[in-house]
Amino acid sequence: MPKTIISSYPEDDSRLPKDDGVILEVSELFTDTVQGEGINIGHPATFLRLQNCTLDCVWCDTSEVWRYGNPYSVNELLNLLLEHDVVTKLRYGQHLVLTGGSPLNQQTALVSFITEFERRFSFIPIIEIENECTRMPLNRLVPFISYWNNSPKLSSSGNSLTARYRPNILRYLSTLTNSWFKFVITSEQDWFEIETNFLRPELISVNQIILMPQGQTKAELELSRLKTVELAIKYGVRFTDRLHIALWDKKTGI
Ligand code: SF4
């Protein structure tokens, strides 16, 4: 079963980092699980979830987690990864998934985290980053990331167009290696929006698209999975399930 190393729910206002180093606001850290979505679905993974998001999607299944966070120094986090044997697993190919909320909200600190990881352990793990495409990545961060799991949000998310749609950022992200665009699908209308706002303006390429059913619970997922597969087949793009929901339902730390 997945193992929780940090869980910041409920938030601890009195927590202080154990040293003066660079700080990350962490919602949770868990290991011995699998990537549940996207191009690497099923791959063994450790998840570092950072606090806060730039958006507030009506169907977000992690908002009860990323709204909370406690401060951890880079050194504390690296010590925890070592103590829990995660470093060895990462060395042998487990992926480190940086997620949120919005990891790019803390990207300066993430660069320090990865740089210090390499200095201490003499390698850089295979890093995936989840990204809602509202922040331009720092040039210093880009070389460290092996997979860009971009997930731009559509009108069905409930966010305003201004908040969720940044054409210049999308165009840049589409040029990166291993850059994928995962869209949450609630109906065929979502596909028409992808065509209008993403494909016709040539912000992203059709072969970077992955359709994922909306479903915060196993029951919801059962209802939406088939129609999303059918849309993916109809429009010639990839489909991804939500493995963690299918296996463990609406539960965090997995
Ligand atoms: S962008 Fe992702 S983490 Fe943020 S509110 Fe939307 S679904 Fe949740």
Image: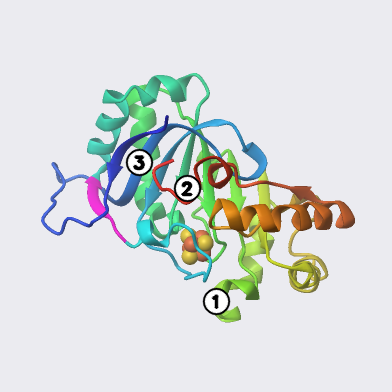
Residue 135 shows in this picture? no
Residue found at x 47% / y 33%: 33
Q: Return the x and y of residue 20 as percentages of the image width and height.
A: 15, 46
Name the element at disc 2: loop
Amino acid type, label 2: Arg
Residue found at x 86% / y 51%: 233
Name the element at disc 3: strand
Amino acid type, label 3: Leu
The residue carrying mark 3 is 29
Amino acid type, label 1: Asn
N-term-proximal mark, 1 vs 3: 3
Principal secondary structure, stretch drawn in magenta: strand
Name the element at disc 1: loop
Work out which quarter of the rendered image holds the N terminus and state it: top left
Tag 1: Cα neighbours inside 10 Å, few (<14), some, or many (≥20)?
A: some
In the image, residue 6 above or below residue 85: below
Asked if the residues shown at circle 2 and circle 1 are in contact, with their CB atoms under 8 angstroms apart, the answer is no
The residue carrying mark 2 is 140
How far apart are the alpha carbons under marks 2 and 1? 29 Å
The residue carrying mark 1 is 159
Look at the image and give the residue range highlighted in magenta: 68-72
Q: Return the x and y of residue 232 as percentages of the image width and height.
A: 81, 53
Residue 171 or 83: which is nearer the viewer? 83
Mark drawn on residue 244: none
Viewer-nearest of labels 3 and 2?
3
Residue occupying the far front of the picture: 219
Residue found at x 55% / y 40%: 247
N-term-proximal mark, 2 vs 1: 2
Residue found at x 61% / y 64%: 169
Work out which quarter of the rendered image holds the C terminus and state it: top left
Residue 116 is one of the magenta-drawn residues: no
